[in-house]
Image (spheres, grey):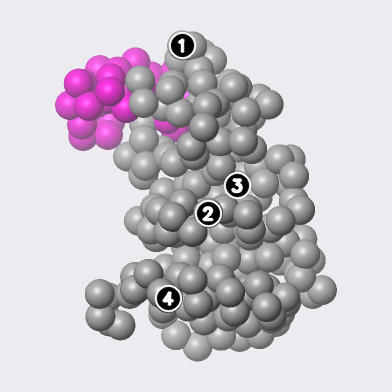
Amino acid sequence: MTDARRLRVLLIDDHQLLADTVSSALESIGDFAVTSVRCLEEALALIGQGEPYDVVLLDYELPDGRGLEGLSAVIAANGRGVALFSGVAGRAIALEAVAVGASGFIPKTLPLKVLNHALKFIADGGTFLPSDLMRPANGIGDGQVAIKPREEKVLALVSEGLQNKEIARAAGLSETTVKNDVKSLCRKLGARNRTDLVLSARRAGLV
């Protein structure tokens, strides 16, 4: 993949060794061009200078990070693809982050292969959550919770109480596609039925 086609990633982390390690690992794949900065102020200034980054990874514990307020500022500045990046943030914080508009939560312990997938998924408009983060609420199995943009639209309409035929009409999809997406969402969120799906999605901050 040429530089022009690489996904632009901004890593905001004050731990230089970790930032260098993550940057080198991602660039070795060949699909990413990574810029790293050490504070929120520098990141916001950088974002304001050009095109939005495809993905922004924001360390939750920056000295000037301001918690979820700082996250909201980065989301407002970049406009897309901002994920919380942390080795210590718990489930509650991760779900709060998604609720305020983050494109997911990336643990610093995530294997490179999964991180590669997660960043591409976020860049494509998806929301990424690791399954072990969700398991206490709904028993999801191994892997990751990766909700596609179309599934997000279907999930939002399911949460409004629409049936498959109504969702298909509203979203411009076939009824079969909607049915398959609902099944996929139930599997990913460990839901037994549509009602359980909506409850699980609300607990996850997805609707």
- What is the C-alpha distance between the residues marked 1 and 2? 32 Å
Label 4 secondary element: helix
Asked whether 31 falls inside the magenta stretch, the response is no
Residue identifier under label 2: 111
Work out which quarter of the rendered image holds the C terminus and state it: top right
Residue 44 percent location from the top left of the image: 62, 79
Bin the neighbour count of mark 1 within 10 Å (Cα to Cα): few under 14, some 14-19, many 20 and up.
few
Please name the residue shown 36% across and 44% down the image: 149
**Marks 4 and 1: CB-CB under 8 Å?**
no
Mark 1, mark 2: which one is toward the viewer? 2
Mark 4, mark 1: which one is toward the viewer? 4
- What is the C-alpha distance between the residues marked 4 and 3? 27 Å
Residue identifier under label 3: 98
- Callout 3 amino acid: Val
- What is the C-alpha distance between the residues marked 3 and 2? 21 Å
Tell me where the magenta segment starts and ends, as one range.
Answer: 155-182
The numbered dot on residue 193 is: 1
Asked whether 180 falls inside the magenta stretch, the response is yes
Whether residue 54 appears in this view of the structure is yes
Residue 140 falls left or right of residue 41: left
Bin the neighbour count of mark 3 within 10 Å (Cα to Cα): few under 14, some 14-19, many 20 and up.
many
Q: Earlier in the sequence, mark 3 or mark 2?
A: 3
Residue 117 percent location from the top left of the image: 40, 53
Residue 77 percent location from the top left of the image: 56, 72
Q: Earlier in the sequence, mark 4 or mark 3?
A: 4
Residue 76 percent location from the top left of the image: 57, 66
Please name the residue shown 44% across and 85% down the image: 50
Work out which quarter of the rendered image holds the N terminus and state it: bottom left
